[in-house]
């Protein structure tokens, strides 16, 4: 299986993550750092001289950081409603995305920002 590392991933609502494979001496890569996630530029950098299996591992690991920051971004940029306030969109469908919080079973709806 040839699983290439993508150059971009787009989450919901236009949150785009850029993935760069850079030389080990890239100034944005810390010393002895093989990969990192920059939330400000929404960019993952990966040492391109690592073996492909390690680069895939780094990619997936940094994507977890990216997704966690995306969750924070979405929470701050989307309107959150209690279930009783849910309303359909123009077609009467429940809007966009529904997250169910497992601890207390309270649902919230995130509208598009
Ligand atoms: Zn980490």
Image: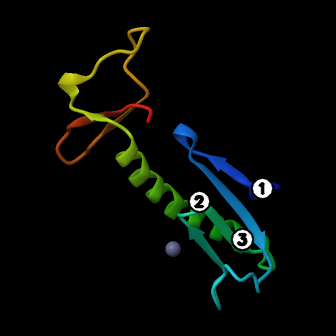
Residue 79 lies left or right of residue 91; in this view the side is left
Could you say which disc has been placed on residue 24 in the image?
A: none
Location of mark 3 (residue): 55
What is the number of callouts on the image? Answer: 3
Relative to the observer, which residue lies in front, 46 or 55? 46
Residue that appears at 20% across and 39% down: 105
N-term-proximal mark, 2 vs 3: 2
Residue that appears at 20% across and 48% down: 103
Give the image location of residue 5, x and y in percent: 75, 59
Residue that appears at 39% across and 31% down: 111
User: Marks 3 and 1: CB-CB under 8 Å?
Assistant: no
Give the image location of residue 55, x and y in percent: 72, 71
Residue furthest toward the top?
91
Q: Secondary structure at mark 3?
A: helix
Q: CA distance from mark 2 to mark 1?
A: 22 Å
Q: Secondary structure at mark 1?
A: loop
Q: Is residue 9 above or below residue 79?
A: below
Could you say which disc has been placed on residue 42 in the image?
A: 2
User: Marks 2 and 1: CB-CB under 8 Å?
Assistant: no
Location of mark 1 (residue): 3
Relative to the observer, which residue lies in front, 65 or 54? 65
């Amino acid at each position: 299986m040839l699983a290439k590392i993508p150059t971009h991933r787009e989450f919901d609502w236009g949150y785009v993550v850029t993935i760069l494979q850079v030389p080990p001496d890239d100034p944005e890569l810390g010393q002895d750092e093989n990969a990192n996630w920059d939330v400000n530029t929404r960019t993952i950098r990966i040492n391109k001289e690592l073996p492909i299996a390690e680069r895939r591992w780094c990619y997936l690991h940094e994507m977890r950081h990216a997704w966690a920051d995306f969750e924070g971004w979405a929470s701050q940029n989307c309107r959150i409603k209690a279930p009783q306030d849910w309303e359909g969109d123009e077609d009467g469908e429940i809007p966009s995305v529904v997250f169910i919080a497992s601890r207390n079973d309270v649902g919230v709806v995130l509208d598009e920002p």
